[in-house]
Amino acid sequence: MALPKLTEWALRLDDLSVARGRGPSSMRAVDGVRAELPFGSALVVSGPTGSGKSSLALALSGRAGRDTRIVGGSAVVCGISPERRGRARNVLTFRVGFLSQDAGPGLDPDRTVGELISLPLLEREPRLARRQLEIRVSNLLDEVRLPLGAAGKFPHELSSGMRQRVALAVALVLDPRLLIADEPLAGIDIEVRHVVRDAILRRREEWGMAALIVSNDVEFAQEIGAEQLVLDRGSVVGVRRAGEEPLITPGAREAHAFLGGA
Ligand SMILES: Nc1ncnc2c1ncn2[C@@H]1O[C@H](COP(=O)(O)OP(=O)(O)OP(=O)(O)O)[C@@H](O)[C@H]1O
C-alpha cells in the first residue's frame, strides 16, 4: 500500500476528542478541538493544569499508548491519522519529532548521548555508515549547543538543562516536518530556551518545519511568532493569531492571562 503523501497542513484537527485512562477511570481529556497548522508555522497550546494539553500533544505524536485514544472527530498529522498502526504509524513517527514532558529526566541511563541521538537514525536507516552517523551526531550536538565531548557521556553525568538539550537533539535528529514539544522550557536554564527557540526558527526558515509547543510562556509564543490556543477542561476557550487581538469564549475570563492579557 502506498504511504500517505504529505499534505500542505502539518496538522488538521476537526472536532477532535481524546480519552485518557482505561476502564472506569477513563475520562475525556480533550473535547472537540479544531485547529489547523500549516507547514512553516507554530502553535503554542496553553492552559491550567489538567486542561488536556499533554493529552493533546501525546495523541498527535504517534507515540500514544492504549491509555490515550481518539474518541471523536479526526486528526491528520503530516498527512497521516495518528490512529493508524503499522508502517503508516512508523512514517508518522519519522515525520513528527516528539519531546515529551519527562524527556530529559527519562533518557535511557544506560546509553551514551551519542547512542541516544543515533538510535532514531538507525531505526530509520539501519545501514547508515558509521561516519555519516558521527557527522549527524556532531551536527545535532552543535545545534543544541553541547560540546562534542558530550557524545561519550551518560545522562547522569549531565545537568538537567543539558539532558533536556539531548532530548531535544533526539527529537530533531530525523529532521522532522513537525516538532511536538510538551513543556520544553519547564524549570530549566535559559540556554534551553534559546536553543529551543533557535532550532524552531532555523528549521522553519530552512524547510518549513511546523511546531506545536505546550507552554504557558506567553513571551516564548510571541518570540516564535506562534498562534496560541488556550484549553480549559479539554475545550478551546481562547485563541490568538500572531499580531492579532485574542478571541475568548464568553465567560472564560481566565483565558486572558494565558494569552498575555490582564
Ligand atoms: N493516564 C491517565 N489516566 C487517566 N486520566 C489521565 C491520565 N493522564 C491524564 N489524565 C487526566 O486527563 C486530564 C488532562 O490531563 P493532561 O495531563 O492532558 O493535562 P495538562 O493540561 O497537560 O496538565 P499539566 O499542565 O499538569 O501537565 C486530567 O484530568 C488528568 O487527570
Image: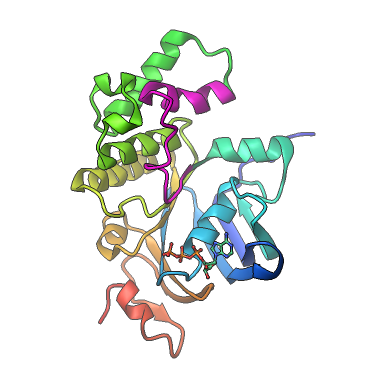
Query: Left or right: where does residue 225 sit relative to residue 2?
Result: left
The N terminus lies in which quarter of the figure?
Answer: top right
Query: Left or right: where does residue 57 sit relative to residue 222?
Result: right
- Identified at 31% across, 44% down, the residue is 196
Query: Left or right: where does residue 103 sit relative to residue 15?
Result: left
Q: In which quarter of the image is residue 156?
A: top left
| Colour setup of the view | rainbow
Residue projecting furthest to the right = 1
Magenta stretch: residue 129 in it? no
Q: How many labels does the image show?
A: 0
Q: Quadrant of residue 59?
A: bottom right
- Identified at 34% across, 26% down, the residue is 154
Q: Give, as a single range, the part of the protein colored magenta.
A: 98-123
Image coords of residue 69 (percent x, y): 67, 58
Q: In which quarter of the image is residue 167?
A: top left
- Identified at 32% across, 19% down, the residue is 152
141, 177: nearer the viewer: 141
The C terminus lies in which quarter of the figure?
Answer: bottom left
234, 156: nearer the viewer: 156
Image coords of residue 207 (percent x, y): 43, 37
8, 240: nearer the viewer: 240
Residue projecting furthest to the left = 190
- Identified at 54% across, 64% down, the residue is 35
Image coords of residue 66 (percent x, y): 67, 52
